[in-house]
Image (cartoon, coloured by chain):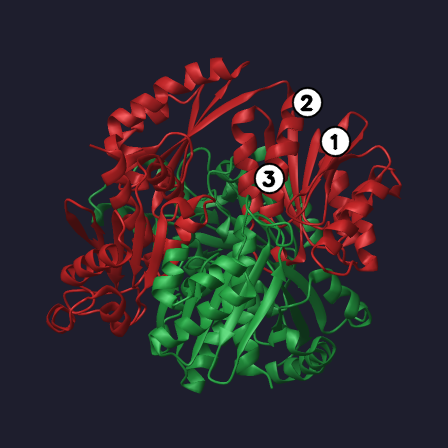
Chain colours: A red, B green
Amino acid sequence: MIAELICVGTELLMGQILNTNAQYIARSLAPSGIDMYHQVVVGDNPKRLTEAVRTAFERADCVIFSGGLGPTDDDLTKETVAEALGKDLVLYDDEWERIVSYFTSKGRTVAPNNKKQAMFPSDAIILPNPNGTAPGCIMEADGKAAILLPGPPRELIPMFRDYAMPYLLRRSGHRLYSREVRIFGVGESEVAYRLDSLLKQQTNPTIAPYAKTGEVTLRVTARCQTDAEGEALVSPVISAIQKELGACVYDTNGRELAEVCHFALIEAKKTLAVAESCTGGRLADAFINYPGSSAYFIEGDVTYSNDAKMRRLGVRAETLDTFGAVSEECAREMAEGCRKAANADFALATTGYAGPDGGEPDKPVGTVFVALASADETVVKRLNLFGDRDRIRHTAMLNALDLLRRKLCTK
Amino acid sequence: MIAELICVGTELLMGQILNTNAQYIARSLAPSGIDMYHQVVVGDNPKRLTEAVRTAFERADCVIFSGGLGPTDDDLTKETVAEALGKDLVLYDDEWERIVSYFTSKGRTVAPNNKKQAMFPSDAIILPNPNGTAPGCIMEADGKAAILLPGPPRELIPMFRDYAMPYLLRRSGHRLYSREVRIFGVGESEVAYRLDSLLKQQTNPTIAPYAKTGEVTLRVTARCQTDAEGEALVSPVISAIQKELGACVYDTNGRELAEVCHFALIEAKKTLAVAESCTGGRLADAFINYPGSSAYFIEGDVTYSNDAKMRRLGVRAETLDTFGAVSEECAREMAEGCRKAANADFALATTGYAGPDGGEPDKPVGTVFVALASADETVVKRLNLFGDRDRIRHTAMLNALDLLRRKLCTK
């Protein structure tokens, strides 16, 4: 089966947004045996979109669209595709009611132009959108299919994963079984080097490496008939990866580093507080983003100023005077002071130079100290991070999480 | 002038890499007045690449290629484009010498197949590559141009910026002038509805709406000869948008909501502290992500537990007992207590049900209170937010920022 992707949006042609949808969809299709030979980006222009639709249907069995399902006159993907397939749009009363109640439940007024979001061909398959007002849909014609998805990734990803991908797999007769091995503490090129022979044997399962800021993930995917068969194919490969990379593998089921810490804290019935300087709220955010974090998260102290470090955490003025706020000593006192103030089992602390300005001759921008205080010890780690301010703050946060993860999950 | 982009690489079709080149090139072209109506991704396949080249030259004056300039047999962009344009490749001795010395200077051996990287049509314009072995080139034919660039961004970006873009600017006559109007407090469909007549008049300048979680941006772009002419075209449209949407327009130069608050605090020489429950660090993070935030950011208190709300902020036990942590009263005491503890000019507070579980009959998931305490008053706003946990937390954060923005920037 051949699929083609058409991303619709003038904002893509203007470079206002990065086309992450294309990578997400391509990566999802890759191990499925569904081939993709073309990805196309066109603007919100009916003539050019019509041409792209015609060309795509000449060379593919299934055309996936992202974007152009919104309420404005610019949004014309559905209208254009329906016309190209010779289908009329009709109002789906239940979808329109859903949109109206979605708006009214939020105390917002539904605008008349929202009505077009409830219009589909009478034989369309509607794809629910729990994260926005625009439902997606599948239109079938002449043994081919058009799958229309909304543009925002937070709407597209769940809709593709939960509805479009299962539809594609049913059509193609394939089944996939995947697990994600998540790795922290070793770079992408070192992972590639150390797993070279394993990566080169890729047939079934395949191993696809991909990088996220500061981390590496390997997606191991088997083509199979049942989940049990898939697991039997995937499991030995994951064991081989774990054997090579040891404690750098922090999860084999695709969980985030913060998520691993989250569940480990809940399981261990331990509590946590965090004291942040350079990460400034991002570390607390990483935990609180998981429902149920109230079980262990006592408090976060974003002590960006020296005054707050002393007042909230009890960091001593002489420590700041002698060693500076970016120092092993300060990180240690922040973690220990935070743990004491919150009466928590563990406390994490971060302090560093996130840039772009600042730093000292022996502590340039990217120098960060992360600390973990617990009942038996306080561990401080010095990091030399690179990249822009956002990247430095992000990788500092990940390193703090990793300190806790190793404390909780490894011997 | 019309340009088209063809990105060549099976790794893009497999989703192994994110196509950042497309965004970089599109964003570079946007202000130049060169139109781009199509972006295409094809694999390293001569037949499909040839088709893509032919189609692109039918509809564009200039076709930009990224990728496929390497030494392997898979790399065939140059050969395919030259053939489509009826040109033969010849060895450029000086380019070959440069490649040989590049390899020897790195202590590496040059392979025979590297020779293809020194072959170009005899009338090509060579684009130097200081960051790799593959030079780029421009092939001109029938008044049209093909610009071939290497795939890796660290090679493509400097080559495009230093050689390809100046070439394109010389060929094209005009330019574009854009400004971004940023809007908070009114949804995308309502913006479209209220600006309907203005949006429909789109000729010069054009108005392109696009949405980011919880916000709306309108990009107003004029075709012009000079920036002054562009500003003269764009400025009355921006005034008309401001007149219709009033204080919901928070910036007309593309700045983020947090950025507007950041600079307003610095300009007003005022200090800030934040007390977060449901946003849990994200509000502090939004400020600290801007260099220079130490000028005003005193501290953040992530008081996710009731215990921390009382201990850190002085929220009264009876307030929590009577009204609950998710209440106007609690938000007020959080903001006022935070302001007092930090001795700051302003304090923001958030408390709410971010879900997916929790909530009360009259306060379902999505109910959030945001508060701003200042010297003269404390303002509390009740919100009914929708979406998943991440979206609710994000839009709660934006609403807190907007309280501060309206206090600082509007009368």
Q: Which image quadrant is residue A202 in?
A: top left
Residue, disc 1: A145
Q: Amino acid at mark 2?
A: Arg
Whether residue B92 is situated above or below residue B320 in the rendered picture: above
Label 3 marks a residue whose chain is A
User: Percent position (x, y) of residue A304?
Assistant: 31, 68
The structure residue drawn at horizontal position 55% and vertical position 36%, both measured from the top left corner, is: A26
The answer to whether dots 2 and 1 both sit on one chain is yes
Q: Secondary structure at mark 1?
A: strand
Q: Nearer the viewer, residue B149 or A254?
A: A254
Marking on residue A13: none
User: CB under 8 Å between callouts 3 and 2?
Assistant: no
Marking on residue A171: 2
The structure residue drawn at horizontal position 60% and vertical position 26%, both measured from the top left corner, is: A34
Q: Amino acid at mark 1?
A: Ala
User: Percent position (x, y) of residue B143?
Assistant: 65, 59
